[in-house]
Image (cartoon, grey):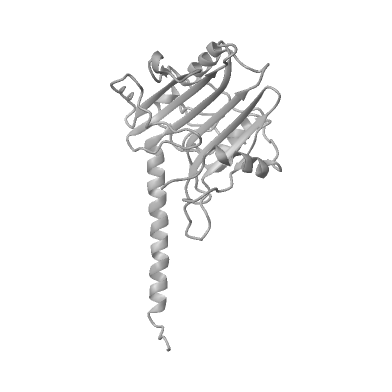
Amino acid sequence: MQLNTGTGLWAAAMLLLAGCGGGGDAGDRAKDKGGATTDAAPAASTSSACPKAPAGAPTIQGVAIGMTGAEAIAALKCADAGYRADYAPRSGTGVPWLPDGTYMRLSIVGGRSDDKSQDKVSVEIYGLKGEERVIGVYREIFFYAGGQPLIDKTKEQLVAKYGALEPIAPPNMGSGLAEEIGIARDSAGAPLPRTSDGMMQNRCWGGDGYAARDAQCGSSIFARIGIDSGNPQLVSNMRLSLDNGSYAAKVMQETDARIAATQQQAKNADTAAAADRTPSF
C-alpha cells in the first residue's frame, strides 16, 4: 500500500503547527554508541515528560523506532525547546481508512528555523488511532552562511552517536558534492553484504519521509552530507534517516489485519441484520 508521507507535507504541516507551542525543556541528547546494530522495541512509558528510548536504540532528535505517536511528539519537543511538532494532515490518495470511517494518521512533522539553519523532521507512523507506532524517522537540515559546520566534525558526531558508519558507495561512484555514509543490517543484526559494484544495499533505509518496509531488514542509519560548492570543508545540508524494515513490516501487517478483521465483522453484522428484512416491490 503506497503511503503519502513525504516532505511535501511540510508547508501544510507548518500552517497546522503555527498554533502549537514549542514546549518542553532541552531534551535527551544521550549518545547511542553502536545503537544502529540493535533492533528497536516499543519504548517503555516513563513518568518523565521526555520519553526515553530503549537502551542502545538509535534515535533522531530523541525519536526511536517503536515509540508511540504521542511519545514521538514529546521527544521532538524535548530535543529542542524551539521545535514545533504535531500530527501532519493527510495528503493524496492511498491513505488507509479506519473501521470508524476516519483516516489513519500516517506522519508527524516537527522543526524550527532561524538565521543559521532550517531543521525539519518527518516521523512515519502506522497503527490505529492512539496506537500508532514509529516505523521511520527522517531529518533534513539546511545550513545558511555563518551556520555551516565542518564536514569532518559532522562525521565525527554522527559516528559518536551511531557507531561506525561506512561509505555507501566507492569514492568514484559517490553523488556529486555529497558524501553518503551509513550502516544497514538484516533482521538478525548482521551487516548487509555489498553488491558486486561495491555499493551498500539501499532497500533497508528510507528517505524523504518514507520508512523502509522489508521483513529481511533490521535497523539502519543513512546520512547524506551535502558539501558546499564554494568551500568543500563545510556542510551545506544533511539528510539523516533511521529505519527498521522488519519492525515496520510487522506493524503494518498486524495493523492491516486488524482493520480487515474489523471491517469484515461489520459486514457480517450488516448481513445478519438484513436476514429478516422482506423487500417490498
Q: Position of residue 32 (x, y in %)?
A: 49, 22
19 to the left or right of 237: right
Q: Nearest the camera: 260 or 24?
A: 260
Horizontal side of 211 relative to 200 (left or right) equals right
Q: Is residue 110 above or below residue 174?
A: below
Look at 30% across and 23% down and name the residue there.
Answer: 195
Residue at screen point 42% across, 62% down: 263
Q: How many numbered marks, from 0 up?
A: 0
Whether residue 69 appears in this view of the structure is yes
Q: Quadrant of the C terminus?
A: bottom left
Can the viewer see residue 50 in this picture?
no
> In the picture, residue 19 is in which quadrant?
top right
Which residue appears at 42% of the width and 72% of the height? 270
Q: Is residue 7 left or right of residue 84?
A: left
- The x, y position of residue 99, in whole percent, is 47, 59
In terms of depth relative to the viewer, which is nearer, 70 or 169? 169
**Direction left: furthest residue:** 196
**Relative image position of residue 98 (x, y in whole percent):** 48, 56
Residue at (61% x, 29% y) in the render? 119
In this view, the residue in front, 263 or 174, is 174
> Percent x, y for residue 10?
60, 39
